[in-house]
Image (cartoon, rainbow, N blue to C red):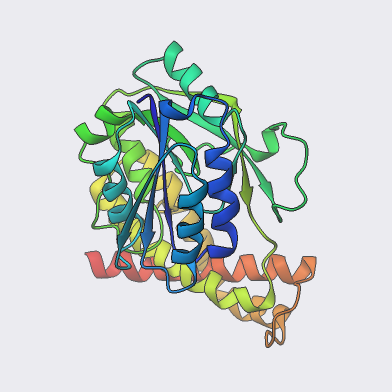
Amino acid sequence: MRATIQLCTYNRAALLERVLDACFEQTVPADSYEVVLVNDGSPDNTPEVIARAQLRATCRFEVIDQKNSGLAKGRNAGIARAQGERIIFIDDDVLPLPNFVEEHLRSHDAHPKAIVRGGAINVESFDDLPPPVWSIKDYSANYFWTTNVSVPLATIRAIGGFNESFSEYGWEDIDVGLRLRFGGVKAVFNKHALVYHWKPRPRSGNVEKMVKQARAQARTAVQLAKIHPHWRTYLATGINPVQRALHNVLRARHGAERYRAALGDLSGDRALSDSELRAARGLANEAYFEELESALHAAR
């Protein structure tokens, strides 16, 4: 078998059906690839979605159920069960184009030992998709971004897969990318290996989740820096004198309070205006750096 599409899902039943259908509708022969899905203890109707998908699957479709344990453990469960020579990672909010697997394999044929990074077009809805043409505005500099990336299965197994100590949100794929990069594995980019990435505009009901997620990401950033004390880590995570000093100044000037004032009443679930969206992102950013300082102090 030439390829495995591997994804984990949690509480995304409303998207998962479309995502799985797109995985099954690939241009390569059905016996040349498989889909390995890890259900990370979803409390919604994900099992019903999976059951329907099993009836429609046109390729080998492997399902792994685990209690809610996080992405790193879920990815490793998928890696352990994969049979493809190449493993292609996507997320449960990603819609692959029909030539997705074909393009990843085309790049691997040209670069057999490499990581292959695909393009992602951010969309607010899967029901209103733009033309499938990647542009620089959707560029991600991540060396290994599991929204759309592939690698030889033997290579990811050789480095031990994902670090399961990353139990909170953030950086588990960056950790893998750094280990692969430092191990000499090159990366190539294929703008034709495309996915649509669901990125809905945040609403008033999402703001506190954004803040909570930012704080979790700050804690795992410190964890990443401890594992990889390297300038790439310090630049990516903000653990450097310039960014820390800037946000210390903003906190001293009560930046978070000003952002909250700009947001106003967040009750209900309404669309955020452009100015409110900027304030929400600013608030999450300040929460990140506040938590970062706390986590760095605790790690001393």
Asked if residue 73 is positioned above or below residue 256 in the image, the reply reads above
Q: Quadrant of the N terminus?
A: top left
Q: Nearer the viewer, residue 223 or 242?
A: 223
Q: Nearer the viewer, residue 76 or 4?
A: 4
Asked whether the viewer can see residue 289, the reply is no
Q: Nearer the viewer, residue 300 or 77?
A: 77
* Residue farthest top in this picture: 110
Question: Can you tell which quarter of the image residue 120 is in?
Answer: top right
Q: Look at 53% across and 39% down and name the residue there.
A: 24
- Report the side of 38 relative to 57 (left or right): left
How many discs appear? 0
Q: Nearer the viewer, residue 105 or 266?
A: 105
Asked if residue 31 is positioned above or below residue 230 in the image, the reply reads above
* Residue farthest front in this picture: 55
Asked if residue 93 is positioned above or below residue 212 in the image, the reply reads above
Q: Position of residue 13 (x, y in %)?
A: 53, 64
Question: Can you tell which quarter of the image residue 38 is in?
Answer: bottom left
Q: Quadrant of the C terminus?
A: bottom left
Question: Can you tell which quarter of the image residue 291 is in?
Answer: bottom left
Q: Look at 61% across and 32% down and name the residue there.
A: 98
Q: Position of residue 114 (x, y in %)?
A: 38, 21
- Report the side of 206 relative to 131 (left or right): left
Asked if residue 244 is positioned above or below residue 118 in the image, the reply reads below
Q: Position of residue 10 (x, y in %)?
A: 44, 63
